[in-house]
Amino acid sequence: MYTAVKPLSKYLQLKSVRIYDGIFTFHAKVTCALLLAFTVLLSAKQYFGDPLICISNMNDKDFVNSHCWTMGMYIMNYEDDELADKQEKKIERDYKNQFLRAEFKPKMDSNLLHNAAPLTADPSIPQERVFLRYYQWVVPVLLLQSIIFYLPAFLWKIWEGGRMKSLCSNLDNVLESNEKTTAHLRKLAKYFTNDYQDTHFRYFTSYIFCEICNFVISIVNMLLLNVFLDNFWSRYVKAVAAVPAYNWDEWNRITTHIFPKIAKCEILKFGSSGTLESIDNLCLLPLNNLNEKIFVFMWIWFILMAVLAGLKIIYRLVIIFHRGLRFQLLRAQTRFMPQSTLKRAIANFSCADWFMLMRVSNNMTRELFSQLMELVFDEKFPTNKPIPNADDKLA
C-alpha cells in the first residue's frame, strides 16, 4: 500500500527556498497530497477488492454488477425515532402476556433496517428509496478537491516568479565561503535600500489573495461535501461525538445512513410474454468501510484548515494596521542587533517591505539575517554609524 502512495512523498519534501508559510503549506500541499493518496487507495482493487458485489438470480453476474454500478443502488429511508417507538410498542403488545416488559429492550440492526427489508410491514411508517448516487463519484470528487486545494499554491508559484529563490539561493549552504555569503548579503542590502515598494506591494497583495482563497476553498469544500453526501456535516457531528464515549452502536447507526455497507438494486426487464419484470438484487459495498473512515478524517481536517486559514487572515489584518507588532516580529529575528539601529534601518519601510524581509528571514539563519539588517543600515547611513549604547545592547 505504501508503494502506491510513495511518489507523493517527493511532493511534500521541503525546498531549499520556502515560498509558503506553515499554514499555507498544510492547506495547499499537505491537503492535496492527502486527497490524492485517498484517491489512489480507493482506486486500487488489489487492496480493497471490487467496489461492488451483488447477489442475483440472473446468470450474468457482470451485467448485474455493471447495471447496479451505473444506475445506482438504494436504501430504505426511515425516521429513526418514529420507527423505534412503533417497533417497541409492537413487541411489547405481542409479548406482554409472556414476558416482563423490562426484559424487552428492542435493539434494531440499523445496517439491515436502512438497507434491506424493513422489520415491520406497518404502512404508516414512511418508506422512501434513497439512491446512493455518490458511490461511483467518490474518486472523481476527491481528485477534483485535490486540484481545487492546490489552486492557490499553483497561482502563487506563478505570481511569485522565483523572486525569493533569486534573493535567498545558497544562503542555507554551510559549505559556501564567508566571502561569497557576505557578497550575497551586500547585494540583498542594496536591493532593500532601493525603491521596490510597488513590486513588494504586488507581491504582498498576491500572497494575501492566495490566503483568502485558502479560506474560501475550505468553506466551499465543506459545503460541497454536505450536498454530495446529504447533510454530511450535520450528521457527523453526532457520529464524532460518539467516538470519545466508545459508543460504537451510535457511530454505526449514524454512519450507516451515509455509508451503508449493504444496498438494494432493482433491475427491470421484459419477460418472455412481454410483461415487465422486477428483479431484486442485494449488493455489498466494500469501499464504504474505507469511505466512512476517510470522510470522518476529512471532516476534522477541513474544519481545522478553515479555522487556521481564518486565523491567518485575522493575523494579516492585525499586521497591516499595527506597525509596532511588525517591528517586534522583525526584532525577534535580529536579537543581536541594537533596537535603535533596527528602527533606523526600517524607518521608511512599508508593510509590503516588512513582509519581504520576513520571507527572507525564513530562508536564512538569524545570524545571517542580523548581518543583512546591519548592512541595510550601513547602506542607508554610510557615514553616520552610531555607537550603540548600553541600553541598546541590553535590548
Image (cartoon, rainbow, N blue to C red):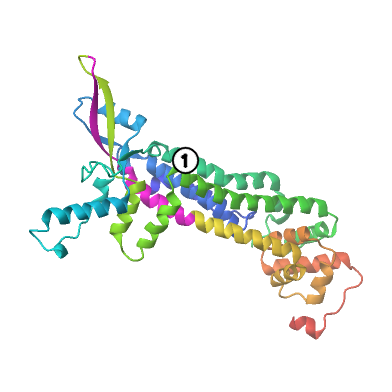
Pick the front one: 323 or 109: 109
Name the residue furthest top: 273
Percent across and percent down for residue 200 are 77, 53
Instruction: Name the residue: 76% across, 62% down.
Output: 354
Residue at image location 39% in from the left, 44% down from the top = 41
Query: Which residue reaches farthest left?
Result: 98
Please indicate, yes or no, whether residue 58 appears anywhere in the rendered image.
yes
332 sits to left or right of 52: right
Please rate how many residues cluster around mark 1, counting C-alpha atoms within 10 Å: few if below 14, some from 14 to 19, many from 20.
some
Residue 161 appears left or right of 149: right
Q: Which residue is mark 1?
A: 141
Where is residue 256 shown, x and y percent of the image?
Answer: 32, 49
Q: Is residue 90 above or below residue 315?
A: above
Closer to the camera in the image, 6 or 300: 300
Span shown in magenta: 274-301
Point out the image quarter for the C terminus: bottom right
- Amino acid type shown at disc 1: Val
Residue at the image point whose x is 60% and y is 55% from the top? 24
In this rendering, the answer to whether 224 lies above or below 376 is above
Give yes or no for residue 190 being in the magenta stretch.
Answer: no
Q: Is residue 164 left or right of residue 224?
A: right
Q: Is residue 161 visible?
A: no
**Residue appearing at x 55%, y 51% in the figure:** 219
User: Image height check: is 148 above or below 308?
Assistant: above
x and y percentages locating residue 90 in the rendered image = 18, 52
